[in-house]
Amino acid sequence: MRMSRLLAPTLREVPGDAEIASHQLLLRAGFIRRVSPGVYNFLPLMERVVRKVAQIVREEMDRSGAQEVRMPILCPADLWQQSGRWGAYGKEMFRLKNRHERDELLGPTHEEVVTAIAREEVRSYRQLPLNLYQIQTKFRDEIRPRFGLLRGREFLMKDAYSFHVDTADLEREYAAMCDTYTSIFNRCGLATRAVESDVGAIGGSAAHEFMVIVDTPGGECDILYSDACDYAANVERAETRVALPTYTPTDAAREKVHTPAIRTVAEQAAMLGIPVDQIVKTVVTLATWFDGPEGKPRHQAVVAVLRGDLKLNLVKLQNHLGCHELRTASDEEVLSHTGVVPGFVGPFDLPRGVLLVGDRSVETMRDFSTGASEKDMHYIHASWSDACRPASVADLVQAEAGMPCPRTPGGTLRATKGIEVGNTFKLGTKYSKAMGATFTTAEGGEEPFVMGCYGIGVTRTAQAAAEACHDANGIAWPVAIAPYHLVIIPANPKDEAVVAAAEQLYAQAAKAGIEAVIDDRDERAGVKFKDADLIGFPYRITVGKALAEGKVEFKPRLASEVATLPVDSVIDHVAGLVREATSGAPAPAPVLA
Ligand code: ATP
Ligand code: MG
């Protein structure tokens, strides 16, 4: 490609709405242009990067034995009504009516459509296992589209779905997919780490997210990892080991005490002269389910109780309740649902219809202090009784950096950030049961398919590479997904010998299978260097004064020094480097700082 012909409109100014480096750089270097929030034009350089990521994904999925298909973007609502998600999916789904007033949607994900394929086309255990995937545009009306391609409303995803006779076979495929994902991201030049994740709205029993670890604001996901073992989890689901309480309980009888103007557990502990872990604190939340095919909302006030020194994790509570939405109640809502002013709600004397749910930390607590469900009053010496105890108990603790590792005694959780580029879910029979997708077993019975699903954000991965690999001057693309491998810069476009040599190198590069751009613009060398660094070509050859001695300058994008190489062998040298970088060699092991 000739730079003079390439549509790569570079910008000098950083566009105002771009908050993170990769988004700014993709705009400045002329890779993308915004059309509307979360919707972008991919200019030629971006299209090349995205195609390369998609191709690596395709090759590795094919290698794993998965089969590529194409499902529709425009999907009928009835499949989603069968699974129950037409109501449950919420506002992220783009819904529309066709000319016959039928409900349709733009696919945000394809569990329903693929389960219907299996239901219609797969009859027998002999046809299993089966893994179907597609690389396709997805639509999600994200509440906050941001960070360029990292969170778009229209984006490219690879989604794969596997079908099995039993969970043992799902486990096998799940492990194989995790290996495939590691190969994919390694080949893209990205070090990733698999972390345990929340199963969220997709449902199922276990899930992992593949994170590109970045210590920049682009890392939207908070990750906790152990300094003592390989435990790592999204903070949404991370576990910890809760220390034993510090106080010795007595058998004193429950008593109501006057505690005016108390709002926090710290104030409560100070006023009562007790440690915070002798307090059972309450958090009033509002849960919503969307029931039936039409998703009629049903609300429930839920009071969560946990030990005073711990924080509530709303995601864990939502999963425990199995509700579709959950939020903490406002002061007015606390009053209207419990009849008590905020700060004094307690587990005893709650109005009928309010659900009490406990964290494990409170299960065996006794002789504790808690709200007396009356303004300016708290109980002391309270204990659970047959009349009052949580309806159910689960791990609801928000784990934080500095808390103990849940797996290894003595280990501590540390925090880092990541971009989720892919994820894997063990779905089990959630969709196959709901949609009546069954197969005939070897014994002649009918069983629902056991399923897994596996996503990769192709466009998100492309930008994540720029977020992980850049410097002050621009992007530094990993060779395997760079839009072009090499830029050839004739330093002085007026010097005929220089231009002729540069053109010859350009022709040689094409023959050697190197994707090269020749910067044939009538610009100063400094301008060309700046643009080359901004765009992020992995290798640069500059033809200049050294040509008189048969030499050219060679520089990998992040090298601090320029090397002088013979003009006759420089293309062989680059070809060797490109071959090495695109051969699927594993990237270095991820380092968590
Ligand atoms: P997130 O937590 O970031 O919203 P998700 O859990 O909704 O992601 P999935 O539904 O599992 O993601 O989608 C699979 C993959 O698609 C994700 O791992 C991510 O790489 C990508 N992805 C999801 N949402 C977007 C988006 N709005 N823009 C770009 N890529 C996305
Ligand atoms: Mg999402």
Image (cartoon, helix red, strand yellow):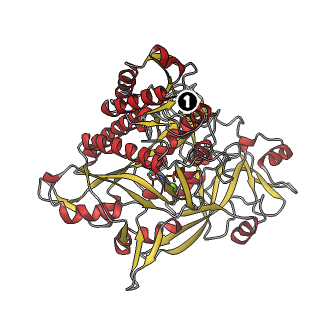
Q: Is residue 316 visible?
A: no
Which residue reaches farthest top? 549
Q: Is residue 262 left or right of residue 250?
A: right
- Mark 1 is surrounded, within 10 Å at the Cα level, by few (under 14), some (14 to 19) or many (20 or more) other residues, namely some
Is 564 rendered above or below residue 504?
above
Residue in front for this viewpoint, 305 or 103:
103
Amino acid at dot 1 = Asn
Q: Is any atom of residue 360 visible in this view? A: yes
To which residue does mark 1 refer? 492
Seen in the picture, residue 189 relative to 317 is either above or below; the reply is above
User: Which quarter shows the C terminus?
Assistant: top right
Q: Secondary structure at mark 1?
A: loop
> In front here: 363 or 135?
135
Say whether mark 1 is within 8 Å of ligand 1: no
Count every numbered label the image shows and give the total: 1
Q: Would residue 133 appear left or right of 188 to someone viewing this image? A: left
* Res 38 quadrant in image: bottom right
In the rendered view, does 211 fall on the left or right side of 78?
Answer: right
Q: Position of residue 216 (x, y in %)?
A: 62, 38
Q: Residue at x 42, y 20 (%)?
A: 567
Return the x and y of residue 559 as percentages of the image width and height: 54, 22
Of residues 65 and 378, the one nearer the viewer is 65
Name the residue located 51 percent from the left edge and 60 percent from the top edge. Answer: 153
